[in-house]
Amino acid sequence: MEPLAGTFESNRDSEPGCESWWNFHRRRFLRGGAMATGGLLSQGMLTKIAERLSMASESKHSEKMRAKSLIILWMQGGPSQLETFDPHPDSKIGGETTAIKTSVDGLRIADTLPQTAEIMHHATLIRSMVSKEGDHERATYNMKTGWRPDPTLIHPAIGSVICHQTEDNIEIPRHVSILSGQWPARGGYMGSVLDSFQTGDPKDPLPNLKSYTDKKVFENRMVDLKSVVEAEFRRGRLRDLDKNKTLHESSTGRATTMMASDQIKAFDITAESKSVIDSFGDHAFGRGCLAAIRLIEQGVRCVEVELSGWDTHAENYSLQSGRCKILDAALHSLIKQLDARGLLDQTIVMCGGEFGRTPTINIANGRDHWPTGFSTLLAGGPFRAGHVHGQTTHEVIERGNDPLKGIEDIVRIEDLHATLLHAFGVDFAKELQTPIGRPLSLSKGNVIESLFV
């Protein structure tokens, strides 16, 4: 069990079973060869040799396939699967939505996403997400952390876990939330240092990056802060992991480093051409998606961009269509730009919300909360491109005694998280010791192996 304060160390050589799943099949074949050799060499000896040869020959391939960054397009409020990625036209549950062809043979999505249809050959589409949470706050917590709310513990968001389990040498925040609402990604028991750095519309400059005094005065103030004020802060205060600084001094140091860094220019989308900026749409969400690309180019590990307004208990089709119009151009341009810049293979894009909408349409012409059989889109990294996992049928009209009726190849929230962590080469079953001494794994889910190449 790893103490929470510990740094991440790879155990690939000592624990081959924790390596990426795509190594497994080749090693299993080699083990089979060991049994077939009989008297030439002992089975155990040849198995060890085969294991090492397989690991050596495939290590570079595994590193290439491992994702480096995550972009989350967070659809706060619960996007309707029926008006986005899982339409059922001309059925009891279909509503006004029709289905259109995509760049993948046989795959159709809602007519609300015509540009997204053109890039579905880059995507892995999950149509069978299942959650046990139907309340916005609880479901958001569940989807962002992979855990259901627990009154004794605050779990870290997926971006915080990835940052905790990887190392970087960048001068700007490694975990960023753009346009975050009331439930931003948090570091939880891993510490506030892993909370996401929150910012607004990228058209506006980041606040408080420049001193309001001249350079000399600012430098003198920083000296005083460190030599006088900080000495007083140290008295009786908790110290951070390096035992030399208070938490206040650590935060101040990170802030001043960020202020002086050239990497901060990644937040400034005006450096991009007008045609690129325009392709994302003239709205904050599109600009946020473009900023996300610029940030991961600088080495940022996780960027979340939020588009709210999906809670359509009334006038579902018109409101969902309006949100989709914003999402459509931004998602299309995000994937296209990542691909053009050679970043898609090392970047995972996840697009979804906390749950879906009911198959039935209520009296206000809306759809209510529906945590079973909703959709999540993945793209990039080691995931299978042009692949659809799971399906829902017309039988999901009423829950009855079986809430999972009409849903095939179910993916639980914790399974999605285990799969994402696995794609980053993170041992999701690793146990950490929380601040109260409680051992807890990074995820309790199972990897959905069929989602990978």
Image (cartoon, helix red, strand yellow):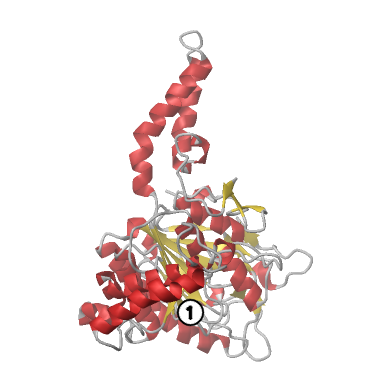
Q: Which of 56 and 117 is in front in this view?
A: 56
- Residue reaching furthest top? 39
Q: Residues within 10 Å of mark 1 (few under 14, many from 20)?
A: many
Residue at 29 percent of width and 64 percent of height: 297
Front residue of 402/308: it is 308
| Visible residue check, residue 429 | no
Which of these two is toward me, 136 or 37? 136
Q: Position of residue 46 (x, y in %)?
A: 46, 18
Decide if residue 55 is in sight here.
yes
Instruction: Tell me which amino acid carries mark 1.
Output: Ser
Instruction: Give the tally of numbered discs.
Output: 1
Task: Residue 67 in the image: state x and y as whole percent.
Answer: 39, 54
- The percent coordinates of residue 146 (x first, y second) are 59, 62
Quarter that holds the N terminus: top right
Q: Is residue 18 left or right of residue 347?
A: right
Q: Which residue is drawn at 26% across and 59% down?
A: 342
User: In terms of image quadrants, where is residue 169?
Assistant: bottom left
Q: What element carries label 1?
A: loop
Lateral position of residue 124 relative to residue 428, left or right: left
User: Relative to 104, is 453 above or below?
Assistant: above
Furthest-right residue in view? 401
Q: Quadrant of residue 120?
A: bottom left
Q: Relative to 270, is 409 above or below?
A: above
Q: Residue at x 45, y 60 (%)?
A: 244
Residue corresponding to mark 1: 180
Judging depth in this view, the residue of 94 and 229 nearest the camera is 229
Q: Position of residue 79 (x, y in %)?
A: 54, 77
